[in-house]
């Protein structure tokens, strides 16, 4: 029987590496991208390129316009500034979006149930994002149980597994693995500012550049200031 | 300190009774209605009337257009017929919408976090809807834990409680309680077909009419055929 997985694909480095891992594990993949009015819309274009590169069975782009109006995050709320000052460890960052991964995983569970997939890949990382509660392993475990109890597939004995292969990897580890899997990092986009060329100074760009440096690789992306 | 609650308000009998219960418990309420392309859009108008009647602090209508395209339910998919033949006990009905309450509660958790509410009211009922996995108490418990772990409010020690006061009540019990609380049932809408006048023969209408009969009350709604 064909193994099917839904991959939550933002178009960034982590989710693209996740896509490669799912394919390497033998899954046929359905890519799922959320358009929630975030500043980095350039990521959605990156997600399209990645889904196409990997011949996803389907690339579903789901609009969540309410996430802009619910607000409360520097990524969706124009009144808040994107941080350029370095992540503060174990504090919840200003880029936290209320219940984001909870909403993403819930929609992914519905999508998985509809296309007959029993795995959902999510590129969360508990090391670099220790401040985000919805990137932690105990949240992922609790969600998996909730989805098993609350879906038809789950109660019928075919629960969805949430796969988070990057959970305890450093950015350098992720890039090393991705390089082995020939991930096309030139197609991805990570910058919080969402310009056509990555800024090189926001927290996300810095983390990425540091990861490439530590992995001994060069980032194929163009940067405005490095 | 003001007690704030989000009430998931479909405009039907159960969620409207939930609204009255939240108010009776001393909460200031934020009403949250989902527009997910369901056939019974008339319900959204009913929700507006109910929110207005109860002077909700805000009535937020959140569009979830992807729930139509994800499909797989008689309520959102035009290719499937709404059941008129009576509910089969302990089977998952054709009106099951993939991961519906999981998605609803996730968005409600985000909304609650944004407006500073620590309770979410959901009018699920495990008796009449025993076939829906996402109406069962074990699902609600698992979700509550997941939301506690995956939100900023939760990890900061102010977790969201999911209140399901109707969980083990019969429809007649709900109507009896609602009548005591002077719930304006004439403003609500329950019919699966979503016409201006309730059909009186779909499963939802039949359950409602049976409930009113058992409660010894008369349903103030007009029906096309009773």
Image (cartoon, coloured by chain):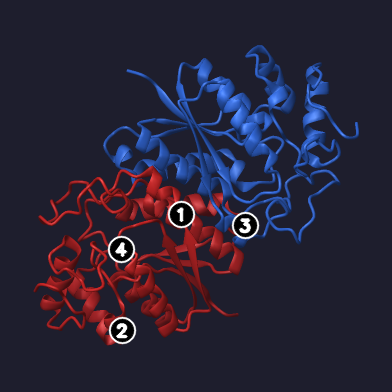
Chain colours: A blue, B red
Tell me the distance, in whole angstroms, between the alpha carbons under discs 2 and 4.
19 Å
Residue shown at 74% from the left, 58% from the top = A78
Residue A36 position, x and y percent, is 60, 50
Q: Are marks 1 and 3 on the same chain?
A: no
Disc 4: CA contacts within 10 A as few (<14), some (14-19) or many (>=20): many
The chain containing the residue under callout 3 comes to A
Residue B165 falls left or right of residue A168: left
The chain containing the residue under callout 4 comes to B
In the displayed structure, B86 sits above or below B194; it is above
Residue B113 falls left or right of residue A143: right
Residue B225 position, x and y percent, is 10, 72
Disc 1: CA contacts within 10 A as few (<14), some (14-19) or many (>=20): some
In this figure, which residue is indicated by the disc labeled 3? A68
Q: Are marks 4 and 1 on the same chain?
A: yes
Looking at the rendered structure, the secondary structure element under dot 2 is: loop
Tell me the distance, in whole angstroms, between the alpha carbons under discs 1 and 3.
13 Å
In the displayed structure, B155 sits above or below B3; it is above
Q: Residue furthest top?
A: A180
Pointer 3 and pointer 4: residues touching (CB < 8 Å)? Answer: no
Tell me the distance, in whole angstroms, between the alpha carbons under discs 1 and 2.
27 Å
In this figure, which residue is indicated by the disc labeled 1? B64
Looking at the rendered structure, the secondary structure element under dot 1 is: loop
In this figure, which residue is indicated by the disc labeled 2? B184
Q: Earlier in the sequence, mark 2 or mark 4?
A: 4
In this figure, which residue is indicated by the disc labeled 4? B40
């Amino acid at each position: 029987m064909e193994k099917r997985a839904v991959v939550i694909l933002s178009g960034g480095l982590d989710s693209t590496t996740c896509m490669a891992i799912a394919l390497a594990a033998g899954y046929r993949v359905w890519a799922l991208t959320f358009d929630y009015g975030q500043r980095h819309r350039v990521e959605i274009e990156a997600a399209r390129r990645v889904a196409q590169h990997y011949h996803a069975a389907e690339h579903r782009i789901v609009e969540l316009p309410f996430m802009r109006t619910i607000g409360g995050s520097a990524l969706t709320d124009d009144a808040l500034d994107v941080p350029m000052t370095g992540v503060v460890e174990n504090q919840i960052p200003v880029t936290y979006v209320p219940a984001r991964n909870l909403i993403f995983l819930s929609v992914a569970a519905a999508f998985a149930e509809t296309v007959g997939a029993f795995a959902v890949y999510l590129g969360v990382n508990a090391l670099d994002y220790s401040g985000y509660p919805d990137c932690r392993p105990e949240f992922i475990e609790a969600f998996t149980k909730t989805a098993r109890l609350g879906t038809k597939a789950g109660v019928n004995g075919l629960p969805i597994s949430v796969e988070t292969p990057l959970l305890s990897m450093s950015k350098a580890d992720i890039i090393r693995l991705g390089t082995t899997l020939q991930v096309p990092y030139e197609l991805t986009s990570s910058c919080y500012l969402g310009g056509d060329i990555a800024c090189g100074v926001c927290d996300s760009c810095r983390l990425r550049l540091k990861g490439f440096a530590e992995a001994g690789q060069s980032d194929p992306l163009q940067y405005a200031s490095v």
